[in-house]
Image (cartoon, coloured by chain):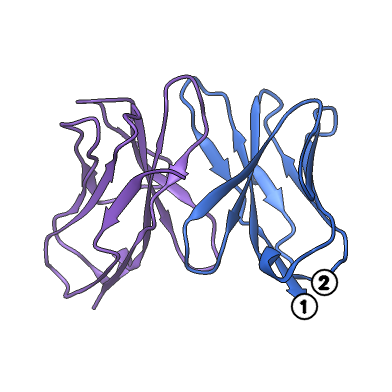
Chain colours: A purple, B blue
Amino acid sequence: EADIYQTPRYLVIGTGKKITLECSQTMGHDKMYWYQQDPGMELHLIHYSYGVNSTEKGDLSSESTVSRIRTEHFPLTLESARPSHTSQYLCASGGFGTDTQYFGPGTRLTVL
Amino acid sequence: RKEVEQDPGPFNVPEGATVAFNCTYSNSASQSFFWYRQDCRKEPKLLMSVYSSGNEDGRFTAQLNRASQYISLLIRDSKLSDSATYLCVVNLNTGFQKLVFGTGTRLLVSP
């Protein structure tokens, strides 16, 4: 069982607010990922990181930003939330030499 | 054409039945393949990796057909707890371990 955590699990917030979704893993994985998933739809990669101080944008354009200052921590920030950002955000991590990914429980975001 | 394609289902089967899902992928250079399971409103969880020689884990068998670019998942003796969405996942082998997820096949096992 993977040790990867996300907070908050659920967030309802008004338009224009700045939010940060937290993701932490205790496995020492160098690779971390953020996905966005709408109900009944596939996962879309929005950000990923090879390691500390490395971040890249994924396939799906996103107004969010990420940082990787510590190996275990990969927060995602939305400077000004909009209703179009309403979705589930899933964080994942993977170890060196493997492409298996382990997912956190997700944050379900609703922007009013 | 999508990079990974699956029949969305749902597949409705009775307990004890055998059910099989297929998934096709478009990139012939893909090297790694997985099946993940996702329960409603939960995160995906790794079910099994798919190897060239095929592999089995209890009631679950995964096969890879590189020539036809598809992978399959066979579930024998279905249980109620097998009801979930099964995601076909492919590593596109682009230099970074980027996985592409299919939309999933929904399985409903009934008593």
Image spot of residue B5 (x, y percent): 69, 49
Protein chain holding label 1 = B
Drawn side of residue A29 relative to residue A71, left or right: right
Asked if disc 2 and disc 1 are in contact, CB closer than 8 Å, the reply is: yes
Q: Amino acid at mark 2?
A: Glu
Real-space Cα distance between discs 2 and 1? 6 Å
Residue, disc 1 = B110
Q: Quadrant of the C terminus of chain A?
A: bottom left
Image spot of residue B25 (x, y percent): 71, 39
Q: Is residue B60 above or below residue B11?
A: above
SS at circle 1: strand
Q: Nearer the viewer, residue A38 or B50?
A: B50
Drawn side of residue B50 relative to residue A33, left or right: right
Drawn side of residue B67 relative to residue A98, left or right: right
Query: Residue B34 sits in which quadrant?
Result: top right
User: N-terminal of the two: label 2 or label 1?
Assistant: 2
Image spot of residue A92 (x, y percent): 40, 43
Residue, disc 2 = B15
What residue appears at the point 43 percent right and 41 percent down from the top-left corner? A59
Crowding at label 1, few (<14), some or many (≥20) Cα neighbours within 10 Å? some
Which label belongs to residue A68? none
